[in-house]
Amino acid sequence: MKKIKAIGLVSGGLDSILAVEIMKEQDINLLALHIINGFDQETMRIRSNTSLDENKVFLDKKTDMSKSLGIDVKIIDISEEFLEILSSPVYGYGKNCNPCIDCKISFFTKARELMSEVGADFVFTGEVLGQRPMSQRKQTMDLIELKSGLKGLLLRPLSARIMAETEIEKKGWVKREFLLDIQGRSRKRQMGMAADFGITDYQAPAGGCILTDENYSRRLKDWFNHNAGKRLTLEDTVLLSVGRHFRLNDDLKIVVGRDESENEYIEKICKEGWLAFVAELPGPTVAVQGDLDERELKRVASVAARYSDAKDSSEVKVIVRRMDNERILTVFPTGDDELDRCRL
Ligand code: SF4
């Protein structure tokens, strides 16, 4: 008789790791699925580092996850298609720019598609009833299950005993008595279980999703507000996570690198627009997004001076460059009050 096979959606957070551990007690085959939507902090960090090979990092990640979970892991990168979801989520955003319901529907839909591909019978997750305000309320969980086409084929082992019995349990594919009854926001039981299982290496709750971050979301909202009709790209989203951002006016924004790695990324991504660097002294790369006149170009140069080693000087020489057009401007560093007014 064919052995039952289940796909576990794993984020790398403790709950999903525990769900895998619990499912290992059942007599079924397991495969883990890790989906990258491009907004976990680790992926942002990798993509903004010009010296890293993204494919190699993801391959290493797959190996590490497989090793620590003790089962095979498949990684699917949906970053490009997720940009559409992020730009116009059907079910809206959470507290910040996090479209959690649409995001989960897309993740679960991918898991359903993988089910057919690998001949799996159902999907399980580490979700806990009532743990997150937006996506882990009973009604929302039901909606996500329905919209992803997983109705009756989705198990939440950590909360299953306080939820209606699923077809998966009724058919005897898994034993309900091995499942748990965790609910709410407290992490106490999970921490205790982690200690019992000897699990020490896991991500913070919410998987470090940068879309739940207030500062990142403010920058992203600013992008949407000033780029009507334009398609958000992966590079746009990574650039929003890098450096200091200032909106100088409705048509003009600048990005200021904070270290060598950010400077390199900014220079690579923004090579077609104006760039500013302080001459002969350490300082940031400043990239311009939008249109500007001579007065504003000087303003940009002054910001570069402010964040350079010459910030206390009264005259700073700053190189401004656009493709082959390069000049040196002499400017006074911008004051912090002015920067605070336009900081994103
Ligand atoms: S927190 Fe981020 S990754 Fe998690 S469901 Fe929400 S949008 Fe998706």
Image (cartoon, rainbow, N blue to C red):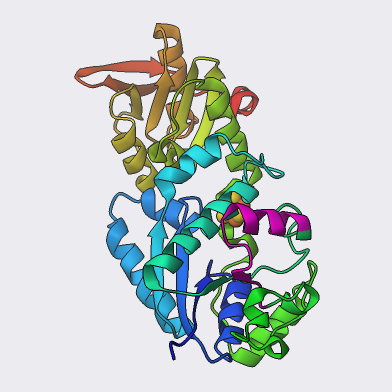
- Residue 253 magenta: no
The image shows residue 341 at horizontal and vertical percentages of 64, 24
| Residue 248 visible to the viewer | yes
Residue extending farthest to the left is 324
Q: Is residue 297 above or below residue 28?
A: above
Q: Say which of 97 and 136 sits in front.
A: 136
Quadrant of the snapshot with the N terminus? bottom left
Quadrant of the snapshot with the C terminus? top right
Q: Is residue 207 above or below residue 21?
A: above
Per the rendered image, the range of residues in magenta is 139-157
Q: Please report the residue visible at 45 percent of the width from the left and 33 percent of the height from the top.
A: 232
How many labels, in total? 0
Q: Say which of 235 and 177 sits in front.
A: 177
Image-based side of 282 in relation to 211, left or right: left
- Residue 152 magenta: yes
Question: Residue 216 occupies which quadrant of the picture?
Answer: top right
Q: Is residue 286 above or below residue 119?
A: above
Question: Residue 70 occupies which quadrant of the picture?
Answer: bottom left
| Residue 243 visible to the viewer | no
Q: Is residue 301 above or below residue 235?
A: above
The image shows residue 315 at horizontal and vertical percentages of 42, 20
Q: Say which of 117 and 161 sits in front.
A: 117
Q: Please report the residue visible at 66 percent of the width from the left and 41 percent of the height from the top.
A: 91
Image-based side of 84 in relation to 274, left or right: right
The image shows residue 92 at horizontal and vertical percentages of 66, 39
The image shows residue 117 at horizontal and vertical percentages of 37, 66
Q: Please report the residue visible at 57 percent of the width from the left and 50 percent of the height from the top.
A: 103
Image-based side of 35 in relation to 96, left or right: left
